[in-house]
Image: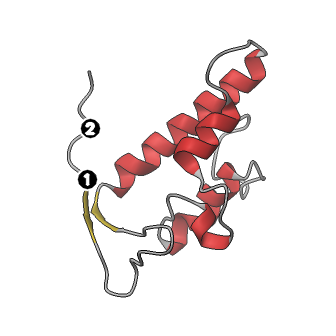
Amino acid sequence: MCFLATIIFGIEQGLYQVSSVPQLLVIDGQQRLTTLTLLLLALGKAIEESGQTLDITKKKIMNYYLVNSEEEGELYHKLILTQSDKDTLINLILDKKTPRGILPEGV
């Protein structure tokens, strides 16, 4: 078993609505959540590239943990980072190219 420490979040007034996807403001733990997101992306890619038939697929990882498949725009993503890192993470999740120099080749 692995313990990753506590993640502290808050509910910002006007941000959380009962009828939509719940949105929470991460106060402490954004780096841990980002690391887990990148790990899940890498796992999904490795499963897809292996060609093996497994119970878990890249699509399941995406839909269970990384995106809200029935939503659009920012609600589509389960984790939105601060402005400086936001586009890079979104591009990785959408399997688009990242700006040169952000990640090593092949990632």
Relative image position of residue 48 (x, y in whole percent): 74, 25
Dividing the picture into quadrants, the one containing residue 23 is: bottom left
Give the Cα distance between marks 1 and 2.
9 Å
Residue at image position (51%, 65%) is: 80
Give the vertical position of 77 relative to 5 (above or below): below
Q: Is residue 50 left or right of residue 43?
A: right
Give the vertical position of 45 relative to 18 (above or below): above
The residue to which callout 1 is attached is 7
Residues under numbered marks 1 and 2 in contact, where contact means CB atoms less than 8 Å apart: yes
Helix, strand or loop for disc 1 = loop
Outermost residue toward the bottom in this view: 14
Give the vertical position of 95 relative to 10 (above or below): above
- Residue 4: give its label: 2
Residue at image position (20%, 48%) is: 6
Q: Quadrant of the N terminus?
A: top left
Helix, strand or loop for disc 2 = loop
Dividing the picture into quadrants, the one containing residue 50 is: top right
Residue at image position (56%, 48%) is: 66
Q: Is residue 4 left or right of residue 92?
A: left
User: Disc 2 marks which amino acid?
Assistant: Leu
